[in-house]
Amino acid sequence: MLAVVAGIGVMAALAAGAAAATAARLDTLEAETSAARLGAAADAGVEIALARLTRPGLAARWAIDGRTYTESYKAAALAIRIEDEAGKIMINRIDGENIGWLMSTLGLPPLQVKTLRDSFDDWIDQDDEPRTDGAESEAYRPRGYAPRNGPPTSVEELGDIRGFTPALAARVARIATVEVNGAPFDKRYADPLAIQVMNDGNANTPDVIERQREIAGQRPAFPISDPADWRGRVVTIIATARGPGGARAQRRVVAEITGNPRQPYVLRWGT
């Protein structure tokens, strides 16, 4: 009798363990399914943005000035932003002085600003003589690489330069890019901070003030000077899908608008 009871206890324990394992697998499957749905919604957000960008007519198409558009896709809430790459700080066309203006505007202390400014100049110059607060080959040798001795080729490269923490590089990346298609900096749809840094570091110039007013809604959303379409523009699309419980998925895509009806855009890269 005792053996029978013990056997029943063992079977019950095994059944409970199997039920718990099954529940865990179901929870995992549900989470994976939810993540896949949100990922698909974020992908749909990118497609929606591309469709709105290539619509004919000034009033019908979406703007490229970083404003947020809200949409929905299969019960997921979408937040979509489109940024003009020509309106960002072109880090392959600036020097340490611009970096100093940027870091001061971000609120960094003067000594840290000087280190970042000197280190950036040492990274891009051709010599191996460090500035007072900069860094050349010797400083980078323990890291296994050397300064580029030329302009950065990506925003992510800032993280390799002495003084740039990952968090700081991420802050800069929001308003930075590398030069695309040889296009000059375009202030029309730029972040006011980018205008400030690409000019002379002065936050009170008419260009900066006018752009701030536009963002605040004190100027028409579509000025008469806007082009008839976004042909030739390179833009970044950020689509974020949100679901229940704070779950989210995001897609970030860089695309060039061609103006060709057969192939209205070309994707540069995406994540």
Image (cartoon, rainbow, N blue to C red):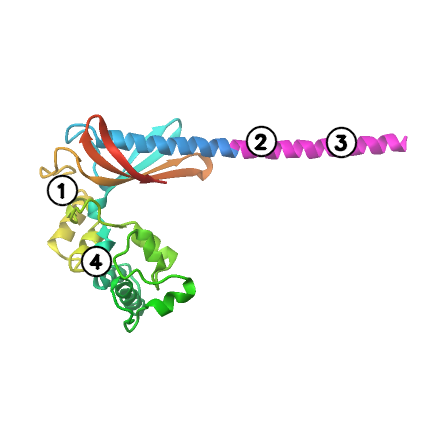
Q: Is mark 2 on a helix, strand or loop?
A: helix
Q: How far apart are marks 2 and 1 (CA)?
A: 53 Å
Query: Within 10 angstroms of label 3, few (less than 14), some, or many (20 or more) residues?
Result: few
Say if 37 sits above or below 223 in the image: above
Q: Nearer the viewer, mark 2 or mark 4?
A: 4
In the image, 133 versus 19, the foreground residue is 133
Q: In which quarter of the image is the N terminus?
A: top right
Amino acid type, mark 4: Ile
Sequence-first disc among 2 and 3: 3
In the image, 146 versus 218, the foreground residue is 146
Quadrant of the rendered image containing residue 14? top right
Q: Mark 2 points at which residue?
A: 26
Sequence-first disc among 2 and 4: 2
Sequence-first disc among 2 and 1: 2
Q: Name the residue under label 1.
A: 219
Say if 107 sits above or below 182 in the image: below
Amino acid type, mark 1: Arg
Q: What element carries label 4?
A: loop
Query: Within 10 angstroms of label 1, few (less than 14), some, or many (20 or more) residues?
Result: few
Residue 243 x/y as whole percent: 42, 34
Query: Within 10 angstroms of label 4, few (less than 14), some, or many (20 or more) residues?
Result: some
Residue for point 21% across, 64% down: 97
Residue 12, disc: 3
